Amino acid sequence: MYRAWAISGAILLLCACDVVEKRYQAFSDIPQQDSVRSWLPDFFPETAVDITFVSNLDMNTFHACFSQPAADKNDLLKTASRATAEGLAWLNQQNVNIVRAACFRSEYNKWGEARVGYYIVGKLLADNRYYIGSMGDEQAERYCTSGAVRRTSPRSLTD
């Protein structure tokens, strides 16, 4: 019996070791050299607050939840292509209460390094709260309206 528990514990430990979760009160609290900035696309708003960031190194994916201050009038979803109904449903499996969703293609990360990636962003029911997740080519084709994967994000949506 003890051996079974020890093996189960070891498996759980090995499976969870490449998932990293970090929390920040504001984007400005993320240290300049923190690897979180290498995951975030260039369009991630620098006005973001109450950030929860989770990366899965094994799957090479991340997702984050964040808020934008009420004073920030930029709607992150206005500059992107809409997500499909299937994309919205997938997002709601990840984080409930998402009411709208859009897709982005970014060519740079927050360090300014070339890193082409596809992202789906959902607006939560809560005021000014968002969910962002990275996705692969196949997911982008499935979850984004036609042409969305060819779009490039602006260098910054907060400028």
Image: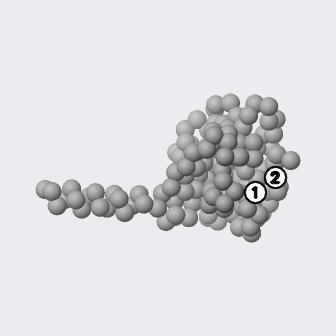
Name the secondary structure under disc 1. loop
How packed mark 1 is, by other alpha carbons closer than 10 Å (few <14, some 14-19, many 20 or more), is many
Residue 28 rendering spot, x and y as whole percentages: 71, 46
Query: Residue visible at 83% across and 55% down?
Result: 154
Amino acid bearing label 1: Asp
Query: Residue visible at 52% across and 51% down?
Result: 21
What is the distance, in whole Å, between disc 1 and disc 2 at their CAs? 6 Å
Query: Residue visible at 75% across and 42% down?
Result: 47
Q: Is residue 91 above or below residue 151?
A: above
Query: In the depicted view, which residue is nearer to us: 135 or 48?
Result: 48
**Which circle's residue, 1 or 2, is located before the other in the chain?**
1
Residue farthest to the right, as pictured: 159
How packed mark 2 is, by other alpha carbons closer than 10 Å (few <14, some 14-19, many 20 or more), is few
Residue 23 visible in the shown view:
yes
Q: Is residue 48 above or below residue 140?
A: above
Q: Which residue matches tag 1?
A: 42
Residue farthest to the bottom, as pictured: 114
Query: In the depicted view, which residue is nearer to us: 50 or 133?
Result: 50
Q: Which residue matches tag 2?
A: 156
Residue 145 visible in the shown view:
no
**59 displayed left or right of 1:** right
